[in-house]
């Protein structure tokens, strides 16, 4: 192995369990991280502040590590890497606490474009699924990338919304980048990689989805984001961990108000009560991003709806606010059910809305 900072960082990352704090300690002790490769065992033990488990792992791994073999494995799995000594390492992550000194990537990850995370409950309501998909799609149409964690519920809806808008979406995993977790999202995982998105992980290939990895990965979700949107979250939701990281990192927090009778919205509504910005329209967030980050959002990027009649627009505007029952659409629009059924059929044919079980309609 050629002793460069980059290669040594990749080696340490492949061992597992070597944190950025440990890398800093090694660098401070030896003066250069490269010196660890030939250092005597007692010095490694001392540099690790007597963390014998990790120190012994480092010492043992030196004798069996094959850098060429590791890089060949990454190549075969379609995985690229970025380390903190690389110029193209994401600038957003350089300034966060306990930054990942190596990230593993699959697919197409563009960190230069504005990125916003959408997080929330795994067991989400139909309203939450709609809201996550709606905001992801609308932001995606404007060239804003969507970050989430590939979990069920809100995460899945956010990724899908961005994909349907032909926008970029990035999934940050709590396992190796070659592993889809949960397995039921394998199709979505493949679609993200094959379209305008990518997979990010600080864990090397082959790393299983261990429980403690997921709170840790949330600091990367928030760290890559210019703002964090919480769509639906209970009082103990993991999404609130992402919010905590985001607050520490100086990120803007947005919350979509939820039904006060839904326990899955208690965490979200509490965020609003504690000062999170209420998000009811994508423009609420866009204006903040324009002012804070001074990037231009091209309105021409936003896809135009099919040409529709004034009556169709009236019905579509009602449905676009939230999933809604046909009886309530009739009440709000003042239309007879027979006339309304015809309009709903037309809007479905045009691909603008879809029908959920129980005669509930939502936008595509």
Image: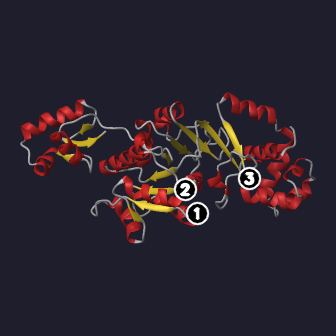
Displayed quadrant of residue 351: top left
Counting from the top left corner in percent of width and height, residue 18 is at 74, 53
C-alpha span from label 3 to label 1? 23 Å
Query: Mark 1 Cα within 10 Å, few/some/many (few <14, many 20+)?
Result: some
C-alpha span from label 1 to label 2? 8 Å
Q: Earlier in the sequence, mark 1 or mark 2?
A: 2
Circle 2 — which element? Answer: helix
Q: Earlier in the sequence, mark 3 or mark 1?
A: 3
Residue at far bottom of view? 274
Query: Mark 2 Cα within 10 Å, few/some/many (few <14, many 20+)?
Result: many
Disc 3 target residue: 18
Q: Which residue is depicted at the point 85% across and 49% down?
A: 59
Q: Which residue is depicted at the point 44% across and 44% down?
A: 142
Counting from the top left corner in percent of width and height, residue 77 is at 65, 30
Q: Which residue is depicted at the point 75% across and 34% down?
A: 71
Residue at far top of view? 76
Q: Image height check: is 24 above or below 170?
A: below
Badge number at residue 249: 1
Q: Earlier in the sequence, mark 3 or mark 2?
A: 3
Q: Are marks 1 and 2 in contact (CB under 8 Å)?
A: yes
Counting from the top left corner in percent of width and height, residue 215 is at 56, 56
Q: Nearer the viewer, residue 116 or 127?
A: 116
Disc 2 target residue: 222
Q: Can I make out residue 129 in this image?
A: yes
* For residue 233, side relative to residue 91 (left or right): left
Q: Are marks 3 and 2 in contact (CB under 8 Å)?
A: no
* For residue 319, side relative to residue 130 (left or right): left
Q: Nearer the viewer, residue 261 or 191?
A: 191
Q: Quadrant of the C terminus?
A: top left
Q: Can I make out residue 238 in this image?
A: no
Query: Mark 3 Cα within 10 Å, few/some/many (few <14, many 20+)?
Result: some
Q: Image height check: is 251 above or below 352?
A: below
């Amino acid at each position: 192995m050629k002793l460069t900072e980059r290669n040594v960082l990749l080696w340490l990352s492949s061992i597992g369990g070597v944190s950025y704090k440990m890398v800093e300690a090694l660098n401070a002790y030896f003066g250069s991280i490269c010196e660890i490769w030939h250092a005597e065992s007692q010095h490694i033990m001392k540099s690790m502040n007597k963390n014998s488990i990790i120190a012994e792992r480092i010492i043992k791994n030196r004798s069996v590590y094959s850098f060429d073999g590791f890089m060949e494995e990454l190549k075969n799995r379609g995985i690229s890497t970025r380390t903190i000594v690389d110029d193209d390492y994401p600038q957003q992550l350089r300034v966060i606490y306990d930054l990942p000194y190596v990230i593993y990537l699959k697919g197409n990850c563009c960190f230069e474009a504005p990125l916003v995370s959408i997080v929330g409950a795994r067991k989400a309501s139909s309203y939450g699924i709609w809201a996550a998909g709606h905001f992801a799609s609308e932001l995606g149409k404007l060239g804003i990338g969507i970050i989430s964690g590939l979990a069920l519920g809100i995460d899945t809806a956010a990724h899908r919304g961005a994909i349907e808008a032909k926008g970029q979406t990035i999934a940050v995993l709590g396992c190796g980048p070659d592993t889809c977790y949960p397995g039921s999202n394998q199709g979505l995982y493949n679609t993200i990689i094959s379209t305008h998105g990518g997979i990010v992980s600080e864990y090397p290939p082959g790393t299983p989805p261990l429980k403690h990895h997921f709170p840790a990965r949330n600091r990367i979700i928030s760290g890559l984001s210019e703002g964090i949107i919480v769509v639906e979250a209970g009082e103990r939701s993991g999404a609130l961990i992402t919010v905590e990281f985001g607050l520490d990192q100086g990120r803007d927090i947005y919350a979509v108000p939820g039904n006060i009778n839904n326990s899955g919205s208690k965490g979200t509504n509490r965020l609003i009560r504690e000062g999170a910005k209420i998000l009811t329209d994508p423009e609420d967030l866009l204006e903040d991003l324009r002012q804070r980050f001074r990037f231009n959002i091209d309105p021409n990027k936003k896809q135009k709806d099919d040409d529709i009649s004034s009556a169709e627009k009236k019905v579509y505007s009602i449905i676009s606010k939230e999933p809604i029952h046909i009886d309530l659409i009739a009440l709000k629009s003042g239309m007879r059910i027979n006339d309304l059924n015809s309009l709903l059929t037309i809007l479905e044919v045009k691909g603008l809305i879809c029908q959920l079980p129980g005669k509930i309609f939502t936008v595509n």
